[in-house]
Image (spheres, rainbow, N blue to C red):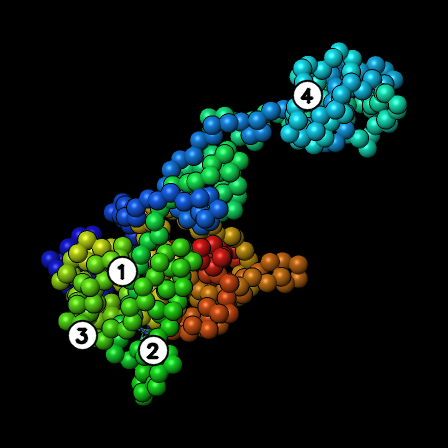
Amino acid sequence: MSEVSAERGRFAAGDALMPIDRALAELDARLTPVTGIETVPVRQALFRILAEDVTAPVNVPGHDNSAMDGWAFRLADLPSDGRLPVVGRVAAGHPFDGDLPAGGAVRIFTGAPLPSGADTVAMQEDCRAEADCVVLPTTLKRGDNTRKAGEDVALGSMVLVAGTRLRPQELGIAAAVGRAELAVRRPLRVAVFSTGDEVREPGTALPPGCIFDTNRITAGALLRTLGAEVSDLGILPDRQDVIRAALREATQDHDMILTSGGVSLGEEDHVKAAVAALGSLHFWRLAIKPGKPVALGEVAGVPFVGLPGNPVAVMVTFMLIARPMALRLMGASVSPPPRFPVQAGFAFRHRPGRREFPRARLAWVDGRLVAEKFPSDSSGVLTSMVWSDGLLEIAEDVGDIAPGDIVDFLPYAEMMR
Ligand code: AMP
Ligand code: MG
């Protein structure tokens, strides 16, 4: 991050806002993974970040095999009446000894290896078994009801790439190619602070003019959905000396520091100055709404992000900026969350300039999927997050939205994991 001390004042109100896309490109360019690597059993690797490429040392399946219970045979041997003598039996795990004798059929079960020479399987529902023979359908094509060796995974192919977040299906593929253990990233350790003289711990008395702390709860929970280990380090007063000491202390055993509040342009916004004094700060006024002020930087080498104070802005800037930042630091490959185009079920005034993220949810109205928008766009109204299932994305250059216009919907489910 570039030094802000030399640049302070450069970001006075009225300066150009930074587009979110540029901010994300800068994050990508400036940050590298900070977490070490450990080896864990596959069954304990759920939602961890893979730290190696996994190549298949085997074909999956390892041999041509039957997809059905039935009879295996060579299609060219099938007489016009479909009748073949039954010359053996193969069950899964018990390969046929030798080659299929010419003109014979073999009783076979799902997953059993095809005897060499057999090329087709008739399913038992379509066959008639007689004493020593079976009458097979004459309508099959060569290869029917068989599975080819390597049709799932070819020997030598790469099945998983480093940076992948391991879902159940990735664990399954690792097991399918024979892996018992995987190299994964250690969890990212993140220190989380709230700031503000008015911010109080829920469960304590609330003096006049004060507000309960929601940001440590939401930001901490958002970090945990990414698999981070969160240290909840409490509420800091609006005092630069205290903030400095706490930040310095947090650098001892964390990979990332996240704060909320104190990064606007007011006199009581001390977080920026504390970070600039201890390390370096790159203060961004992002061209987004909600959540304009975001501070990024580093304290004694530990990456730092300072989110705004307003509770909705905290969650939105987390999803847009802190999440890709944390993913990058934890060695995960980062891709933009998917956007789903839906019809607007509302009218909305949008002044071009900032990319806006109103809170919304989807509903079926007269057979059409439409986005409903929460009535208030205030970045302080946390109930808007509870009501909604995602964000709408109104591009910088777009004007007013009318009912029926197509808008992009970003589900929270895609950004809280
Ligand atoms: P600030 O960015 O510090 O000026 O804060 C902006 C607004 O967010 C103020 O109304 C604060 O009271 C509120 N706020 C700041 N931190 C928190 C918090 N941890 N929980 C709830 N509200 C907060
Ligand atoms: Mg404050």
Secondary structure of the residue carrying tag 2 is loop
Circle count: 4
Query: Few, some or many C-alpha atoms within 10 Å of disc 1 (few <14, some 14-19, many ≥20)?
Result: many
Kindly check if marks 3 and 2 are in contact, taking CB atoms under 8 A apart as contact: no
Q: Position of residue 373 (x, y in %)?
A: 50, 67
Residue at left offset 53%, top offset 63%: 361
Give the label on residue 96, or none.
4
Tag 3: amino acid: Arg
Q: Is residue 383 above or below residue 417?
A: below
Q: CA distance from mark 1 to mark 2?
A: 20 Å
Q: CA distance from mark 1 to mark 3?
A: 18 Å
Tag 4: amino acid: Phe
Q: CA distance from mark 4 to mark 1?
A: 62 Å
Residue at left offset 26%, top offset 75%: 196
Q: Position of residue 321 (x, y in %)?
A: 34, 56
Return the residue at label 2. Answer: 201
Residue at left offset 66%, top offset 26%: 94
Judged from this view, the residue extending furthest toward the top is 102
Q: CA distance from mark 4 to mark 2?
A: 71 Å
Instruction: Please name which of the two marks, 3 or 2, marks the residue nearer to the observer.
Output: 2
Kindly check if marks 4 and 2 are in contact, taking CB atoms under 8 A apart as contact: no
Tag 2: amino acid: Glu
Return the residue at label 3. Answer: 239
Q: Earlier in the sequence, mark 4 or mark 2?
A: 4
Tag 1: amino acid: Ile
Q: CA distance from mark 3 to mark 4?
A: 79 Å
Secondary structure of the residue carrying tag 4 is loop
Instruction: Please name which of the two marks, 4 or 2, marks the residue nearer to the observer.
Output: 4
Return the residue at label 1. Answer: 257
Query: Few, some or many C-alpha atoms within 10 Å of disc 3 (few <14, some 14-19, many ≥20)?
Result: some
- Asked if one can make out residue 42 in the rendered structure from this viewpoint, the answer is yes
